[in-house]
Amino acid sequence: MSGTLYVVATPIGNLEDITLRALRILREAAVIAAEDTRRTFRLLAPHAIPTPMVSFHAHNTRARLPQLIARLEGGESVALVTDAGTPGVSDPGLELVQACIERGITVDPIPGASAPLTALVASGFPLIPFTMYGFVPSRAKARIQWFSEIAKTCHTFSFFESPHRIQPTLIEASVYLGNRPMMLGRELTKAHQEFVRGIASEVGRGISAPKGEFTVVVGPAMKLNIDNAIPPSDEQVAHDFWQITNVGGVSRRAAVTQVAEKYKRSPKEIYSAVERVKKLGE
């Protein structure tokens, strides 16, 4: 008889958020598959949990997967944890869960902390429906496509961003999301937890220090009559263009593409609008 894969949620900041059930599973499992064994050790040590650990992360998944499956099929139970939060949510774990399901191995989720849900309930935005996205892509072309797609989501949604990219991301978000309400959650559940509310063009100025991973929650879009929508003025187009290039550090070509995507106009039209405004100011 095969063992059980326990998918264990761990604290996202405050170590007191570990559940009693999670501690029991971590103590009883034959092995803990951890994204970073050093970080998991800091969670286990205060509770005197001696369970051995093996690393399981994005860079060793291919090699480690058959080893863990073999242990599970041999009757051992494995507890899967990541650095913080629920495994599989923008973290390693999905491949192992899928492999267990394909082989008929029992998968038992142990619920707990989740950064998107923690930020969501603090946002004050409608909770249902809600869509959760992962990290914003790093490459310019992928970011354009990504923002174009998520801007179509009319209900509440969330995404993650790193501290060194949060400012340019908010500039780009202001182009695609306009005046939609937004909340930034930083250092969730920790001593310096911070929530900043406003719209994309404002919230960046409210960040005390761009440190710690950000969870961004975007509120619902206002309902508009698309057929009667007023076309953007040259001034609005130019404003968005210069906002991206001057503050976001994006190239002129990429900025033209982003603004064109937002307003569903050709890059040539956007460039012409920017040039017209530029000449008026000369």
Image: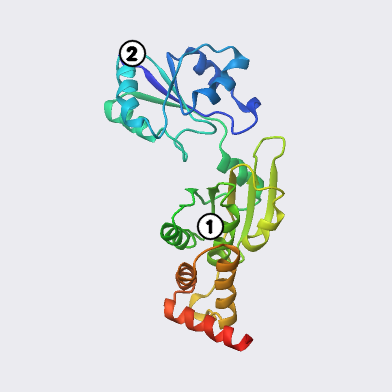
Q: Is residue 93 left or right of residue 178?
A: left
State the count of labels. 2
- Helix, strand or loop at label 2? It is loop
Task: Give me the residue at 55% from left, 72% from top.
Answer: 241
Residue that sits furthest to the front in the current view: 282
Work out whether residue 42 or residue 230 is closer to the camera in this orientation and state it: 42
- Secondary structure, mark 1, is loop
Q: Find residue 78 and report its horizontal and vertical position in percent.
A: 41, 19
Q: Which residue is mark 1?
A: 155
Name the amino acid, label 2.
Gly
Closer to the camera in the image, 30 or 34: 34
Residue 60, placed above or below residue 171: above
Foreground tag (2 vs 1): 2
Kindly indicate the quadrant of the structure image that contains residue 187.
top right
In this view, 48 is above or below 86: above
Quarter of the figure that contains the N terminus: top left
Q: Which residue is mark 2?
A: 75
